Amino acid sequence: MDAANPSMTTVSRRPRPKTRTGCLTCKSRRVKCDERKPSCLRCLSTKRICEGYPVVDRPTAAITNQLADEERRALAFFRGQTAHRIFGEQDANDWVPVILQIAHVEPAVRHAITALASVHESLQPAKELTWIRQSPQDRSLSVQMLALRHYNHAIQSLRGESIDMSSRPDITMVLCILFLCFEQFRTGDAACLVHLTAALKLIDWWRSRTDNYTKLKDYSRPTLEFMNEKITPIIQRLRVQFSLCMDSRHSWRGYGFTPGLPPPTIPPSYSSFDAARRDFDRAMNYIFSALENKEVLCPHKPVRDPISVLHHWKDTLDSSDLSSQATHLQDCSHQLLELYYHVSIVITGTYYTVLETTFDGYIDQFRAIVDLAEQVVLDWQHAPKEYSLLFSFDLGITPPMFLVASRCRHPEIRRKAVRLMLESPFYHGVWPDRYTGLCAERIVDIEEAGMERYPDGSTYVPEHCRIRKVSADLQDTKDHIAMKFVRSPFVENSPVYTTMVPLTS
């Protein structure tokens, strides 16, 4: 009590324990966080982007011990083998910790990883499947049944927990990618296309969802960066690969997907091949959107001719001084970008054609593509061991080689493309390049059957003998590929032929 003022009393404040679980934005501002996720209300009310929450360092062993034996085994197999097969060595280091962290708190993701790792393990040589004491055939079947069971659990968990794109876009897209990989391991293109189409629709939704601050502030910065820097590039690369391996002239309209993507902003120069590769992915997606829609449905930016976007990107790449990055890996990246540039020229020039003979005017581009691919394969042999497997979600030689083998009717060039695929130790997606090479080899055999060879070794394939559209699915027995095709000229009710391609000689 103050002697001068007896009525005043001294109030002592009790110290409050500091919260250590608030978002990073509130912690840096030293204000109390309400801890709502993905973005806290305090950040939203003050029009700030929530920086997200610190990652809680939970002991992996303690978490793993809470899981069932089959889940522990699957997570270990995913971490040690499957992730590296899918993402490659570089991207796996970024993806694995994130996905496993999500899997420990999201049952749907955990089931999806268990399913994916199990179906991958079922494809391993029988002698390596020693964890179940049964015959090799029964062991493989048991792992496949385990994979399907967890795949169904993942779908049920997704429905039961009502995870939706608006609240958890990162989880939704991770599941979409895991489902896509699962179907690629298990069957082939047809089922994958369903998940890829869904992913493309979700990415298009995400772009519209985050095009202004009012919508943007609903998500934390880690979520925004994960969606924009990790998810979107992978989906874009997959779209390019699928559009090259199936006939790119058959629009995605039939799958209910016709987005209008804006053209990429090409800088004056590139500081790295990775930056050039990202812009190429964006350019190719813009090109496909422009070709499929005949105009880009983007009201905020004028329509640009696809071929001008390609030339602009190539001029920037050629003028960029990237000599300081001249490692074996970067040489491969540069050659792959050059290779894909020639591929894109062929695609834009033939997209609206109804005649397969139009491709006969691109012999120089086809020859350049296979020569660059051959050099890439040679350079890979001298690359560091950690890069001996090219990223499955990255640019590879298989889509361009399949394009050459199926569209170029020059016998020498197309057979060189087939040989590069058959001899390749790499994977396209999760299919061995050799599988795609076997399908391409069958296309060559079908088209040239009964054709007369000229003295110079060339063979002219008439229009009605050429194959226009192809799809392929790995059979459940894993010993054959069912390849379906349509001959030219292609019409809506064209007969569909099926040929079985054996995987063993």
Image (cartoon, grey):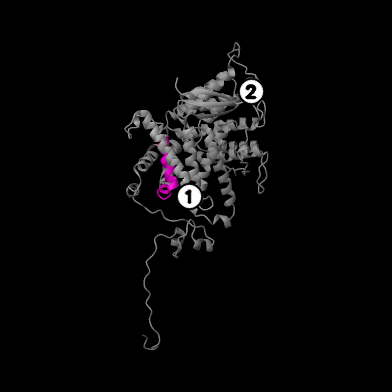
> Which residue occupies the foreground of this view, 371 or 498?
498
Residue on which the image places disc 2: 360
Left or right of residue 129: residue 330? right
Q: Is residue 364 above or below residue 121?
A: above
Q: Please tell me the numbered disc located at residue 12.
A: none
Task: Decide which of 418, 253 is in the foreground and name it.
Answer: 253
Task: Give x and y (percent) for residue 306.
Answer: 64, 37
Give the residues drawn in magenta, as a range.
101-119
Please state the total of marks drawn on the protein image: 2
Q: Is residue 46 above or below residue 437?
A: below
Above or below, 416 against 314 in this view is: above
Q: In terms of depth relative to the viewer, which is nearer, 136 or 443?
A: 136
Whether the magenta-drawn stretch holds residue 236 is answered as: no
In which quarter of the view is residue 47 placed?
A: bottom right
Give SS at disc 1. helix
The residue that appears at 37% across and 38% down in the rendered structure is 77
Q: Taking 244 as reference, is 229 above or below it?
A: below
* Residue 160 disc label: 1
Sort mark 1 into few (<14), some (14-19) or many (20+) by Cα contacts within 10 Å: few
Residue type at mark 2: give it. Answer: Asp
Q: Residue at x 56, y 20 (%)?
A: 444
Please check the rendered image and state whether residue 110 is part of the magenta-colored stretch, yes or no.
yes
* Dominant SS type (magenta): helix
| Tag nearer the camera, 1 or 2 | 1
Helix, strand or loop at mark 2: helix
Q: What is the CA distance from the residue labelled 1 to the residue labelled 2?
A: 54 Å
Place of residue 103 in the rendered image (x, y in percent of width and height, measured from the top left): 42, 47
Decide if residue 14 is in sight here. yes
